[in-house]
Image (cartoon, grey):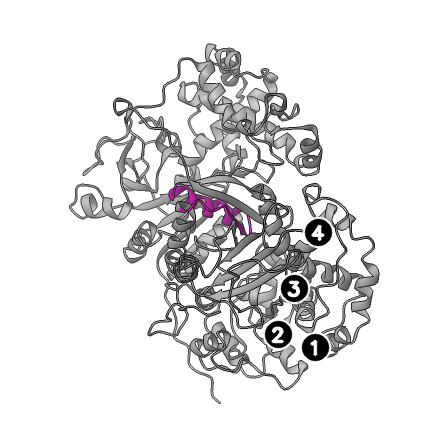
């Protein structure tokens, strides 16, 4: 049924300030490839976005095509732009046409020069993009009715089916079902009209499975959430709300789409699935929700077009729809833009305040990380997060930027339930650091924060004494509640076990930074800074590190550390490597500042320089000393003076929290100061009043501005300030995905991007992000991107005719 759908407003064009993901999506398309959204609308025979939205909402007729051939041709034309220079076909000189990559048959180029230039990037993704191109066509069989293929009744209890391997083991041989589709008329029609050669049968079988997995992933995600929260569909009927449902879940949806739940829970008491979202598409599932359950052993699907909190007020509060036992969200995207955030905040607060079990999925680890940050800001009680065992196997590409790692539907998950309970702090303790009775207690408390079963997520409080958590004896990092969980998790954990061992050692050795043992002293630079291009060059100037490291190994602090750490002391070689990794993270900060100076051609010998570290927080300022950037003195001996001002709302009190300089002090010194607050506030309060120097360079370590729904209040004013004052800026990211997301936002803000890539002075200390240890580690300052000022756009003339 349709509720009061949010108004489009006066502008029907693409934009960021919208609760509609397609409106935001069209804006992002145009940011990467100007004019691409208009091409898509033209191929759909629609004049503007408003007409497109009206068609989706069933207010007028949607796109019609004269034949399958025309439909597939129009679909392919929406992907036709040069992946090297982003030119669309009508921007090319007369007589020139876009040529498709012969290997992936997915991306296009306007000339050999563009293809050659792009190959270094494209070759990383060419094979995967070939699969994307096949799946994009095979997916049509969903609408033709050939997919999903029929599945078998479950021969195991739901609790024993932990991932796709377990699910597939119950299905028997899929080949007869897949071959029937291969030999069917719809498959023949597809490749007859698709303007490309039919792949071989083995490739098509794999594609059919990938497309099927995306379909099944939704029902299995609901079941995963039911299991995690201990909900029992045999004990009582259950109601599940799908919040933020849109095209993907409702276009062509059938009332049988969640029938896999019947096979999973045979004889259940009844399951209701209500899809709610402003982008729900008209169809047979758009019907009123149940007030009381109908027949048992059935899944009843309905849908409502509108925001979730509107649905709650209009139907749930009036008892015209049942209160949910569980809320699931597929890729909510509330971290992406201000508009989407505004649409989601009332819903998230509603879920929190009514203590409704919630389970949301994400496209990748970075989206999970950013979503978790927002949920933590809202004081949600996070119950678990990590890779999703029933993630779709079908890779997805970013349409306007194909040469980047593909995403997968429901790749990761986060579950949360109610408001996080916080212990009351005695008034006299406010503002004081955490106090422990001994170092042993401190290390015990730190270790307890990592104690949960890496397979099922259970914490010690959820176990009986007989089921105490046991630590993996190899990595001494992750825990399991029983042998069955450890065995089930081993295929995943074995990929990361050795790396997690380093993580466990490093997080203890890092304590030596606060004790003053690290970083170890370094030598004066024997070569010009321009010649030091990476860690190997830097280490070559340091000589033999063993005497410096061995002095720490034999020191009293190291002995105290392992006496109190409740785990055996590693071998000296392991500890030397750990000392170096921890030190590399410390030195990475001044060396990244130096990289920024070099990339922007700033010379500390010709004049004093001021560097602002924007978004500084606990990582940069907890335990910070006034000497933390003295590596810059060794790098630029005899320089005119360097000032580093750390600015951020999470700056921690300490000796560096002092006023910035108005005029430079002695030469050949690095002066560090810090200000607690947002950068644009610092600018207004100090820089504009000339109580702080204007920066020659701004650096941000993992700013995370792509993560927050409060972009408008936090990072956006700062980014616009940097752009409009044309301040050279270099920001770092934890990995390539975060860099890509961040650059997309900067491109939307029309920043002039000056470069990006791997940081040659990235930290070598692996970090585990989030509550799931069994995933690829990240390293601080792993990647960088730099920008300065507003991108100058060149007006292009319309081609004749």
- Tell me if residue 586 comes above or below residue 140 in the rendering: above
Relative placement, left or right, of 378 versus 113 is left
Q: Which residue is mark 3?
A: 256
Which residue lies under the disc numbered 4? 266
Disc assigned to residue 82: none
Mark pair 4, 3: CA separation = 15 Å
Viewer-nearest of discs 1 and 3: 3
Q: Are marks 4 and 1 in contact (CB under 8 Å)?
A: no
Residue 663 painted magenta: no
The residue under label 1 is 195
Task: Point out the frontmost of discs 4 and 3.
Answer: 4
x, y (%) of residue 421? Answer: 40, 34
The reply to whether the C-beta atoms of the residues labelled 1 and 3 are less than 8 Å apart is no
Percent x, y of residue 91 = 50, 78
**Magenta stretch in the rendered image:** 354-379
**In the rendered image, the vertical position of residue 621 relative to residue 149, given as above or below:** above
- N-terminal-most mark, 4 or 3: 3
Q: Are marks 3 and 2 in contact (CB under 8 Å)?
A: no
Q: Secondary structure at mark 4?
A: loop
């Amino acid at each position: 049924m349709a509720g009061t759908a949010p108004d489009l407003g006066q502008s029907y064009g693409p934009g960021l300030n919208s609760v509609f993901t397609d409106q935001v999506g069209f804006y992002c398309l145009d940011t990467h490839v100007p004019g691409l959204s208009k091409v898509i609308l033209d191929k759909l025979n629609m004049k503007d976005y408003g007409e497109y939205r009206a068609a989706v909402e069933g207010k007028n007729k949607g796109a019609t095509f004269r034949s399958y051939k025309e439909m597939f041709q129009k679909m392919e034309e929406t992907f036709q732009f040069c992946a090297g220079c982003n030119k669309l076909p009508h921007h090319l000189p007369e007589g020139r046409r876009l040529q498709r990559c012969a290997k992936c048959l997915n991306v296009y180029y306007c000339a050999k020069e563009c293809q050659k230039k792009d190959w270094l990037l494209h070759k990383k993704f060419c094979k995967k993009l070939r699969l994307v191109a096949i799946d994009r066509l095979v997916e049509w069989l969903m609408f033709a009715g050939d997919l999903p293929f029929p599945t078998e009744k479950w021969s195991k209890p739901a609790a024993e089916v932990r991932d796709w391997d377990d699910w597939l083991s119950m299905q028997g041989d899929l080949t007869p079902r897949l071959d029937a589709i291969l030999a069917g008329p719809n498959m023949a029609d597809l490749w007859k009209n698709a303007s490309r050669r039919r792949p071989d049968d083995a490739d098509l079988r794999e594609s059919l499975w990938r497309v099927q997995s995306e379909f099944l992933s939704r029902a299995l995600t609901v079941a995963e959430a039911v299991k995690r929260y201990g909900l029992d569909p045999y004990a009582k009927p259950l109601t599940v709300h799908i919040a933020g449902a849109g095209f993907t879940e409702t276009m062509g949806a059938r009332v049988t789409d969640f029938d896999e739940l019947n096979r999973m829970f045979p004889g259940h008491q009844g399951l209701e699935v209500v899809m709610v979202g402003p982008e729900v598409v008209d169809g047979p599932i758009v019907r009123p929700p149940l007030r009381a359950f109908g027949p048992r052993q059935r899944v009843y699907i309905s849908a409502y077009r509108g925001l979730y909190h509107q649905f709650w007020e209009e139907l749930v509060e009036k008892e015209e729809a049942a209160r949910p036992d569980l809320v699931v969200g597929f890729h909510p995207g509330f971290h992406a833009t201000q508009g989407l955030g505004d649409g989601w905040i009332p819903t998230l607060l509603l879920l929190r305040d009514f203590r409704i079990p919630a389970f949301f999925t994400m496209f990748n680890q970075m989206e999970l990380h950013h979503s978790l940050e927002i949920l933590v800001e809202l004081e949600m009680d996070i119950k678990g997060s990590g890779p999703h065992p029933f993630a779709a196997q079908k890779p997805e590409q970013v349409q306007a930027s194909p040469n980047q790692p593909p995403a997968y539907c429901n790749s990761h998950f986060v579950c949360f339930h109610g408001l996080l309970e916080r212990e009351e702090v005695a008034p006299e303790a406010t503002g004081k650091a955490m106090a422990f009775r001994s170092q042993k207690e401190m290390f015990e408390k730190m270790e307890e924060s990592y104690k949960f079963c890496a397979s099922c997520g259970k914490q010690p409080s959820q176990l009986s004494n007989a089921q105490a958590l046991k630590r993996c004896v190899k990595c001494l990092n992750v825990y399991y509640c029983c042998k069955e969980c450890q065995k089930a998790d081993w295929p995943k954990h074995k990929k990361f076990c050795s790396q997690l061992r380093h993580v466990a050692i490093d997080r203890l050795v890092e304590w030596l930074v606060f004790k003053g043992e690290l970083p170890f002293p370094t030598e004066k630079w024997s070569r010009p800074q321009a010649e030091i291009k990476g860690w190997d060059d830097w280490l070559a100037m340091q000589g033999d590190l063993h005497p410096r490291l061995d002095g720490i190994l034999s020191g009293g602090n190291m002995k105290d550390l392992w006496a109190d750490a409740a785990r055996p002391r590693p071998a000296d070689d392991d500890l030397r490597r750990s000392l170096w990794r921890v030190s590399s993270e410390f030195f990475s900060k001044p060396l990244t500042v130096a990289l920024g100076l070099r990339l922007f051609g700033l010379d500390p010998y010709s004049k004093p320089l001021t560097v602002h570290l924007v978004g500084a927080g606990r990582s940069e300022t907890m335990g910070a000393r006034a000497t933390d950037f003295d590596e810059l003195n060794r790098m630029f001996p005899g320089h005119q003076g360097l000032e580093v001002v750390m600015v951020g709302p999470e700056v921690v009190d300490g000796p560096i929290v002092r006023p910035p300089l108005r005029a430079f002090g002695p030469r050949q010194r690095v002066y560090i100061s810090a200000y607690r607050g947002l950068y644009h506030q610092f600018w207004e309060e100090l820089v504009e009043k000339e109580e702080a120097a204007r920066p020659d360079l701004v650096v941000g370590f993992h700013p995370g501005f792509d993560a927050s729904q409060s972009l408008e209040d936090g990072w956006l004013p700062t980014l616009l300030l940097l752009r409009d004052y044309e301040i050279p800026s270099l920001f770092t990211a934890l990995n390539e995905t975060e860099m890509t997301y961040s650059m997309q936002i900067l491109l939307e803000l029309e920043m002039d991007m000056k470069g990006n890539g791997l940081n040659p002075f990235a930290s070598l200390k692996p970090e585990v992000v989030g509550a799931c240890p069994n995933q690829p580690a990240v390293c601080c300052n792993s990647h960088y991107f730099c920008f300065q000022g507003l991108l100058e756009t060149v007006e292009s003339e319309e081609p004749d005719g």
